[in-house]
Structures are given as C-alpha cells and as structure tokens.
Amino acid sequence: MPTPYSVDEFKNRIDSLYRLVIVGARRANQISKNESHGFGGLTRGVKPTIRAMEEVLEGKVSYYEADREDDHYLDS
C-alpha cells in the first residue's frame, strides 16, 4: 500500500493546493492513457494518481502559467 501524502510535503513544489490538484490530475490522465493494461491490470500496480503525486514531489512534473492577455481565443 502506498504511503499517504500530506499537503505539507508539496509546499516547496507547488504554490497552491488547487494547482496541485490540476497538475496531478492532468499528469494522472497522461499516465493512464499511455499505459496498456488488461483486465484488472490497473489495480495490481501503482495507481496513476499516486504515481503523478510522486512525480510532482520528485520535481519531474512542471507547469507554466499562461498570461490572460495572451489568451486570444475569441476573435473580435
């Protein structure tokens, strides 16, 4: 069984709890899409959410902040 994590462990890696959830969820989705597993294969190994949190703690996952002014998704 994996070790439970505390929010305090992530203070030096990510600036807010909300960003941690978003970054962790996106990374977990990437991991689960890239894995090929058969029936019950996901439950036998380390789950994607735990692996994503481990990667955040190890500094393997990075993110960037987009400037709101640079987001031109609407044409005037």
Image (cartoon, rainbow, N blue to C red):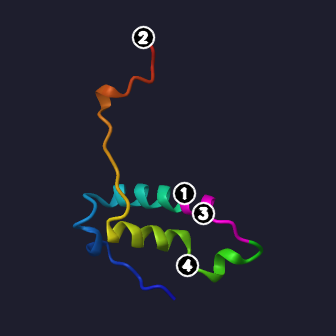
Q: In what element is the residue under mark 2?
A: loop
- Give the class, few, some or many, for how many residues have Cα within 10 Å of label 1's Cα (few <14, many ≥20): few
Q: Amino acid at mark 4?
A: Val
Q: Earlier in the sequence, mark 1 or mark 4?
A: 1
Residue 6 sits in which quadrant?
bottom left
Kindly identify the amino acid type of the residue bearing the numbered disc 1: Gln
Q: Residue at x 28, y 58 (%)?
A: 16
> Mark 4 vs mark 3: which is more N-terminal?
3
Tell me which residue sits at (48%, 72%) in the image.
51
Looking at the rendered image, the disc whose residue lies closer to the viewer, 2 or 3, is: 3
Task: Give the residue type at disc 3.
Answer: Ser
The residue that label 2 is drawn on is 76
- The kind of residue on which mark 2 rests is Ser
Which element type, helix, strand or loop, lies under badge 3?
A: helix
Element assignment for label 4: loop
Against 64, residue 51 (above or below) is: below
44 displayed left or right of 69: right
Location of mark 3 (residue): 32
The residue labelled by disc 1 is 30
